[in-house]
Image: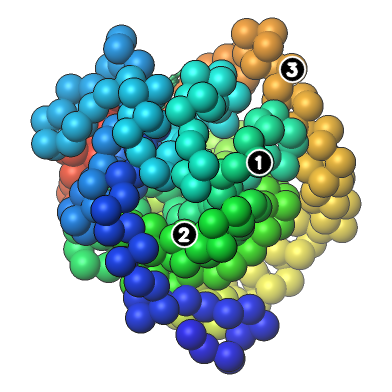
Amino acid sequence: MTDEFTTEVYYDDDADEAQLADKTVAVLGYGSQGHAHALNLHDSGVDVVVGLRESSSSRAAAEDEGLTVATPSEAAAQADIVSVLVPDTVQPAVFEEIVDELDEGDTLQFAHGFNIQYNQIQPPEHVDVTMVAPKSPGHLVRRNYEKDQGTPGLIAVYQNVSGDAKDEALAYAKGIGCTRAGVIETTFQEEVETDLFGEQAVLCGGVTSLVKHGYETLVDAGYSPEMAYFECMNELKLIVDLMYEGGLGEMWDSVSDTAEYGGLTKGDDIVDDHAREKMEEALEDVQSGRFAQEWITENQAGRPSYTQLRQAEKNHEIEDVGEKLRDLFAWAEEDSESEDDEQTRVNAD
Ligand SMILES: NC(=O)C1=CN([C@@H]2O[C@H](COP(=O)(O)OP(=O)(O)OC[C@H]3O[C@@H](n4cnc5c(N)ncnc54)[C@H](OP(=O)(O)O)[C@@H]3O)[C@@H](O)[C@H]2O)C=CC1
Ligand SMILES: CC[C@](O)(C(C)=O)C(=O)O
Ligand SMILES: [Mg+2]
Ligand SMILES: [Mg+2]
C-alpha cells in the first residue's frame, strides 16, 4: 500500500488469496467480464462455477476452457461468492432467480454498481455486498492476465455482514489480476457516477463523436475517405498510446511543435465551453438517476432507440472504409485480439 496518493492503492502483497481458499465463486455470465473473471480466477487456483441459462450460446465456450457450467441458480447454490456479470439490464431478473440461494455469510458481488445505486436490486441483509470492477474492457482483463500483467481495478463494500468483505474483495481482485496493477477502494455511488459519466462523455460517446465529426469534415471538404480514416481514426490509437504511457506530456513531446501549437490553440476552441456544459448536463443526469430511468424505460420498451442508433453507427461510412483498410494493411493483424477473445465476443453479442 502506498500513501503517495489521495486514496490508498492496493497491490498483490496487500491481498491474501487465503480469503478464497475453500470457497466457490459462481460467475454468472460468460461475456466480456464474465469470461475474464472466470478464467483468471480458475487459473489462479480458485474453485469456479459459471452460471448460464440452459440455452446460452456461451456454454460451449466456457466448457471448452475446462470450466464447470451450471444454471445461475444451481451455480449460486454451490457458491460462497456470487459474481453477477450478466448485462446490467438483465441483472434484476437473474437476481430474482438466485436470491433464494444466497445463504448467511455469502457474498453478492458486482463489477459495476448500477443496480444497487439505482435500487433495481435489493440484496438480502444477511449477505456481504461488494464490487470488484476492473477499469477496462473484459477482453483486456483476460489478455493482460495471460501476459502476466495486471489491469487496474476498483473495490467497494456496500454491506459487510461478515466483517471480511473488503479482504475478500481484495483477494478476488488478486485472483483476476487487478492487484498486479493496483486497486483503489471506492463506493458504489462513486463508481457508478464516474463510470457512466466517463463512458458517455469521453471514452465511448465523446471519442466516437469526435472521430465521426472529424472524418465527415474532411470527406465533405473533398478529401479521400482513406485519408480521413487514417487521420481521424487509425492514428488516434497511436496518440492515445502515448498518453497512456506517459500522460499528456509524453504525447505533446512526441508530436511536432506545429502539432502541439495547433492542438493547444484549436483543441479547446473546438471542444469548448458548450461541450463542457453538455458534459455537466450528462453528469447531472447520471447523478439524479435520470439517465438510469431512461435506460431502464428504453429496455422495457424493447430498446427501440438503442436498436436504431446501433444500426446507424454500423452504417456509418467510416466503418466500411476501416474494414477495407484493416484487411489491406499489416498492422491490423498484429493488433488484433486472439481468436479466443474474438470467439467470446461473438458469443457475448
Ligand atoms: N464490458 C466490460 O468490459 C465491463 C463491464 N462491466 C460490468 O460488468 C457486468 C457485465 O457486463 P458485460 O461483461 O459487458 O456483459 P456481457 O453483455 O458481455 O454479458 C453477456 C453474458 O451474459 C449472459 N446473459 C445475458 N442475458 C442473460 C440472461 N437473461 N440470463 C443469464 N445470462 C445472461 C450471456 O449469456 P447468453 O449466451 O445466455 O446470452 C453472456 O454470457 C455489467 O455490470 C457491466 O456494467 C464493468 C466493467 C467493464
Ligand atoms: C468504458 C466502458 C465500460 O465502463 C468499461 C469497459 O469500463 C463498460 O461499461 O463497458
Ligand atoms: Mg468502465
Ligand atoms: Mg461502464
Q: Which mark is residue 169?
A: 2
Label 2 or label 3, whichever lies nearer to me, is 2
Front residue of this view, candidates 298 and 169: 169
Horizontal placement of 161 versus 182: left or right? right
Image x and y of residue 44, in percent? 21, 58
The residue that appears at 47% across and 67% down in the rendered structure is 167
Of tags 1 and 2, the one toward the viewer is 1
Side of 49 relative to 105 (left or right): left
* Residues at marks 1 and 3 touching, judged by CB atoms closer than 8 Å: no
Dot 2 crowding, Cα within 10 Å, few <14, some 14–19, many 20+: many
Q: Which mark is residue 286?
A: none
Which of 248/14 is in front?
Answer: 14
- The residue under label 1 is 125
* Residue drawn at (23%, 27%) of the image: 69
Residue mark closest to the camera, 1 vs 3? 1
In what quadrant does ligand 1 lie? top left
Name the amino acid type tagged 3.
Answer: Thr
Label 1 environment density (alpha carbons within 10 Å; few <14, some 14–19, many ≥20): few
What residue is pinned by disc 3? 297
Estimate the spatial distance between the alpha carbons at disc 1 and disc 3, rounded to whole Å. Answer: 28 Å
**In terms of depth relative to the viewer, which is nearer, 28 or 81?**
81
